[in-house]
């Protein structure tokens, strides 16, 4: 759809005598549309975001379990010292 609307605008430019401008603009937009160089960075950012969300979701229940483990270890150490 985007390229179809762009074609209409380029036809208008062509009617004004800008056929070379039309070719250059069309080529530039097609190159931009096919360019995937930044795609990897976006994918890594999305993956890092999902890991961060998962970590935040797991921390409260995990924090309680870790607290219980340390309390149990503290109790064992305290009983063996006395």
Image (cartoon, rainbow, N blue to C red):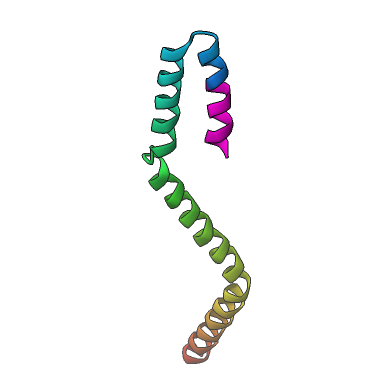
Q: Residue at x 55, y 66 (%)?
A: 54
Image side of residue 27 versus residue 2, left or right:
left
Compared to residue 59, the image places residue 24 above or below, namely: above
Decide whether the magenta segment is chiefly helix, strand or loop. helix
Q: Position of residue 35 (x, y in %)?
A: 38, 37
| 59 and 65: which is toward the camera | 59
x 40%, y 19%: residue? 24
Q: Nearer the viewer, residue 6 or 44?
A: 6
Give residue 51's position: percent from left, percent from top.
Answer: 50, 61
Identity of the residue furthest to the front in this view: 15
- Specify whether residue 8 is painted magenta: yes
View extreme (top): residue: 17
Q: Which of these two is toward me, 37 or 3?
A: 3
| 16 displayed left or right of 31 | right
Residue at the image position 57 percent from the left and 40 percent from the top: 1
Q: Is 3 contained in the magenta span?
A: yes
Q: Position of residue 79 (x, y in %)?
A: 52, 91
Residue 46: give x, y in percent of width and height.
49, 53
Numbered range of the magenta stretch:
1-10
Residue 73 versus residue 8 in the image, above or below: below
Q: Nearer the viewer, residue 65 or 37?
A: 37
Q: Quadrant of residue 61?
A: bottom right
């Amino acid at each position: 759809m985007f390229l179809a609307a762009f074609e209409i605008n380029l036809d208008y430019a062509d009617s004004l005598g800008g056929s070379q401008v039309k070719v250059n603009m069309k080529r530039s937009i097609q190159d931009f549309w096919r360019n995937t160089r930044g795609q990897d960075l976006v994918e890594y950012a999305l993956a890092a975001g999902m890991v961060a969300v998962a970590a935040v979701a797991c921390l409260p229940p995990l924090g309680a379990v870790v607290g219980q483990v340390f309390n149990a270890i503290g109790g064992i150490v305290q009983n063996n010292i006395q």
